[in-house]
Image (cartoon, grey):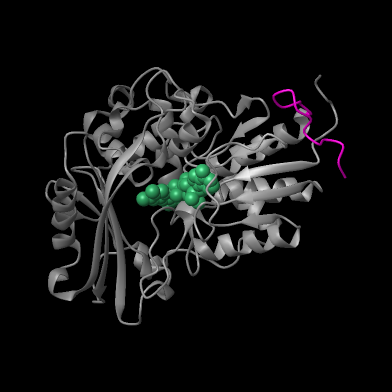
């Protein structure tokens, strides 16, 4: 029989941004929380590599217009965040017509005036943006948004979805901030907060079934959730992009970042805003070049090298370290025409199971979706008062 008392215990599966947000939210409501993380450390895609090169697989930019900014700040978890120094920001370049330029096509700015709500959900971005600002601006804007979309052809996605990301990533003053020391500094603060609130954290603990004695927030990637819940409906589009991480001997005059306008790509010298990410005298550059389904890693790497040749002259001779990888389905949700975040896999899965992560039905950009869905999933889980699979959830336990 359904129960109406708020839950007193919660299980969280996954210890990335979403899982830690869920655990803290529940523990702040005096709920007993156990968090299971498969890896030996917390953070998921927000982990920062140990030195000497403090790379990220996942997040770099923490957008200060996002809901997670306020949530972290209110709890003193934001810590030091760096902005790009103005002199470095002036070294942002746009790759168009085969050369690096200081500005994108000016028609692109016409598009920026349009609020996302004015862009149709049902139409693709290229069709809508071409009508509003012409085909050159539409193509440039679509490729520019690769910085947050990680898709080889962003113009084919829903106009509203792309326009929201265009406005967020091109906002002035820029929204992007960078946790000093990398995102793991934020993760460490979140973990400490969870610990102080009494959350039981089990690392090296990969669950292969969902516990039935408490409500559960599954805060894994969507792929992992699909396997865990044996639910083939848990699918949504995401990007496929080649990641090139590079440490080069620093050289005055190197670009700060390169935005691909001829083709979608983004390269950024992250030591420009945080020198602690590489040993003194070296620059850490991380780039991503989205690739089409028929393309290989080498295709994306070749395009990245083309940009490196232009933006970091002599980079081959200056390279101290390099790593290439492909991120497939790990860069957040992509909404096709006719869909919005509301159409993604629902947070409420039934039987006391709730889904959080960056591919589920919650608003925001990139990791913001993990934060917002985690708060929503936890709130629903705590208020559900359901009886799981006919078993008592221990809702009345102190
Ligand atoms: C290349 C790249 C660049 C990005 N750039 C940005 C950016 O600039 N800004 C931004 O905001 N976001 C960015 N993102 C997105 C961001 O990384 C993710 O949205 C965010 O880290 C997802 O957090 P999460 O907690 O939802 O999932 P994850 O970080 O994937 O955490 C899930 C956790 O669950 C664990 N797990 C999985 N299965 C199990 C199991 N069965 N039992 C126990 N534990 C399990 C995993 O080990 C993992 O630790 C980027 C992502 C990528 C790949």
In this view, the residue in front, 281 or 120, is: 281
The quarter of the rendered structure image containing the C terminus is top right
Kindly tell me whether residue 176 is visible in this rendering. Answer: no
Q: Is residue 353 left or right of residue 27?
A: left
Q: Is residue 27 left or right of residue 365?
A: right
Q: Where residue 89 appears, x then y in whole percent?
A: 36, 62
Q: Where residue 47 appears, x then y in whole percent?
A: 47, 59
Q: Is residue 148 above or below residue 118?
A: below
In this view, the residue in front, 370 or 178, is: 370
Q: Where residue 232 appears, x then y in whole percent?
A: 44, 24
Identified at 17% across, 34% down, the residue is 294
Identified at 18% across, 52% down, the residue is 301
Q: Which residues are magenta?
A: 385-398
- As drawn, which residue projects farthest toward the bottom? 280
In this view, the residue in front, 124 or 249, is: 249
Q: Where residue 281 appears, x then y in whole percent?
A: 30, 81
The quarter of the rendered structure image containing the N terminus is top right
Q: Is residue 347 left or right of residue 303?
A: right
In this view, the residue in front, 141 or 272, is: 272
Specify the principal SS of the magenta part.
loop
Please give the count of numbered marks on the rendered protein.
0
Residue 202 highlighted magenta (yes or no): no
Kindly tell me whether residue 291 is visible in this rendering. Answer: yes
Identified at 23% across, 44% down, the residue is 261
Q: Quadrant of residue 384?
A: top right
Q: Quadrant of residue 211?
A: top right
Identified at 48% across, 53% down, the residue is 44
Residue 395 highlighted magenta (yes or no): yes
């Amino acid at each position: 029989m359904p129960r109406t008392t708020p839950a007193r215990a919660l299980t969280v599966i996954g210890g990335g941004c979403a899982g830690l947000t869920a655990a803290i939210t529940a523990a702040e409501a005096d709920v007993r929380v156990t968090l299971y993380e498969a890896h030996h450390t917390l953070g998921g895609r927000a982990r920062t590599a140990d030195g000497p090169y403090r790379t990220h697989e996942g997040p770099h930019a923490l957008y200060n217009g996002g809901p997670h900014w306020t949530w972290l700040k209110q709890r003193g978890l934001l810590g030091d965040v760096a902005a790009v120094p103005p002199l470095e920001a002036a070294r942002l370049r746009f790759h168009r017509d085969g050369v690096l330029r200081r500005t994108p096509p000016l028609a692109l700015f016409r598009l920026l005036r349009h609020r996302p709500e004015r862009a149709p959900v049902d139409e693709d971005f290229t069709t809508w943006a071409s009508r509003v600002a012409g085909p050159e601006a539409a193509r440039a804007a679509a490729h520019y948004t690769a910085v947050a979309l990680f898709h080889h052809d962003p113009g084919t996605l829903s106009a509203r979805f792309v326009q929201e990301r265009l406005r967020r990533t091109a906002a002035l003053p820029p929204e992007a901030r960078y946790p000093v020391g990398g995102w793991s500094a934020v993760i460490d603060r979140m973990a400490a907060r969870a610990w102080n609130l009494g959350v039981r954290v089990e690392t090296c603990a990969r669950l292969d079934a969902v516990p039935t004695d408490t409500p559960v927030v599954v805060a894994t990637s969507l792929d992992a959730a699909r396997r865990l819940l044996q639910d083939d409906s848990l699918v949504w589009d995401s990007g496929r992009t080649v990641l090139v991480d590079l440490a080069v001997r620093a050289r005055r005059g190197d670009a700060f970042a390169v935005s691909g306008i001829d083709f979608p790509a983004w390269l950024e010298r992250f030591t420009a805003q945080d020198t602690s990410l590489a040993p003194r005298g070296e620059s850490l550059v991380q780039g991503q070049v989205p690739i089409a389904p028929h393309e290989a890693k080498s295709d994306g790497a070749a395009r990245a090298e083309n940009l490196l040749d232009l933006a970091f002259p002599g980079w081959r001779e200056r390279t101290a370290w390099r790593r290439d990888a492909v991120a497939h389905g790990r860069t957040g949700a992509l909404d096709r025409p006719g869909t919005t975040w509301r159409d993604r896999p629902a947070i409420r899965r039934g039987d006391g199971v709730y889904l959080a992560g960056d591919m589920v039905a919650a608003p925001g950009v990139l990791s913001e979706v993990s934060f917002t869905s985690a708060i929503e999933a936890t709130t629903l889980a705590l208020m559900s008062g359901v009886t799981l699979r006919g078993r008592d959830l221990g809702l009345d336990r102190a």
